[in-house]
Amino acid sequence: MDRKHTLLHTPEGVRDLYGKEYARTLRVCEQLMRSIGLYGYEPIQTPTYEFFDVFSKEVGTTPSRELFKFFDRENNTLVLRPDITPSIARCAAKYFMEDAGSLRFCYQGSVFCNISSLQGKLSEAMQVGAELIGENSVYADAEILAMTIDALQSAGLQDFQLSIGNVEYFNGICEEAGLTGEDREILRQYIADKNPIAAGEFLAELPIPAKNREQLLALSNSFFERELTDHLTGLCQRAKDAINHLRTIREVLSQYGMDRYVSFDLGLMSKHTYYTGIVFRAYTLGVGSPIAKGGRYDSLLGHFGKEAPSTGFVILVDELMEALDRQKCEIEVPEAPVVIEYHDSRKEYSAALSEALKLRKSGRPVILSPVRTEGVIS
């Protein structure tokens, strides 16, 4: 392939978005942002790239091998953001933590992940999300979940389900079992991958009480539940508190009239280890991966020098658009432009321009076009 031909194509993992497809995407993003704004969240924009340390292993975000890295003139390592939440945490810690009360931010932007195309994912993806900083309550968690549901509905989606877990359930059992460090992280990954065989083999080698081994193995094979029943017997207090928190969230969401969208999965984990409480994902028909996800991350801002409880969510716009297409949901897009043609004379052009200005003032898009005769502009 010669160089000129190569320049007509995009690199692996990215694509062009244009025409009606792009108009529909913009419309959906607009609807999502409007819905989030009704909860009092203010738009924020953070840089497309940051210092590497904002997304370091210690922060608990995307693994280093999946980052797009480059250097500035001072030889600092920079990365294209793989996740917007740490950027907002950094920004909030720098500019807003002297403010009294809670902070509510919403955003729209691209994230970048250096992954193989064999995974079926784009390297650049559009996200719309929100973060609530400074509130540590079941009501704050419920607000984030309700806002996710409202936003998805505003985009035209009706048939979906939020699966909610709580990492404190896993943490409580691990604490009681004396499981820490690398062993705990390996097991967390097996549970996140829903791999009961690997989890079972790994747990069999660990010197932990049989009761805790059974509880942890059950997490690797857990799936959606409408009710959290029969889970409190034999649990440590930390794990009990995690379940009771989820039950209270359901009660609050019933006040929103949204509890029918909720199910539970105590084995739900995220690849981002900065989550400290609830975690959730939204699923719908026709799409194998989540269309939204989020959770509580009370320790994240501490990496940037300011402690503050926080919770948030992100809607994965590409996956949402796929779901809307598969479910044949209608998306309103701007009406097609009116085409006003004119011949090459000042008088006719002036009349066409006058009409175009009038229509544009009324809100109609207009294309002024010279008349074409047999493929030639006259």
Image (tube, rainbow, N blue to C red):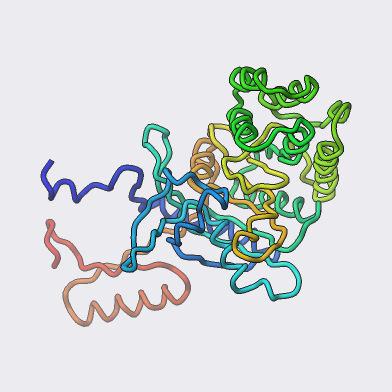
Viewer-nearest residue: 156 or 356: 156
Viewer-nearest residue: 72 or 16: 72
Tell me: 201 left or right of 364. Answer: right
* Residue positioned 57% across, 67% down in the render: 91
Viewer-nearest residue: 92 or 37: 92
Percent x, y of residue 230 = 86, 26
Tell me: 241 left or right of 126. Answer: right
Location of the N terminus (image quadrant): top left
Is residue 28 in sight in this rendering?
A: no
Location of the C terminus (image quadrant): bottom left
Quadrant hosting residue 260: top right
Tell me: 73 left or right of 271. Answer: left
Is residue 327 in sight in this rendering?
A: yes
Residue 226 lies, with reference to residue 88, above or below; the image says above
Percent x, y of residue 217 = 70, 22
Residue 239 lies, with reference to residue 33, above or below; the image says above
Quadrant hosting residue 176: top right
Percent x, y of residue 190 = 60, 28
Residue 172 lies, with reference to residue 351, above or below; the image says above
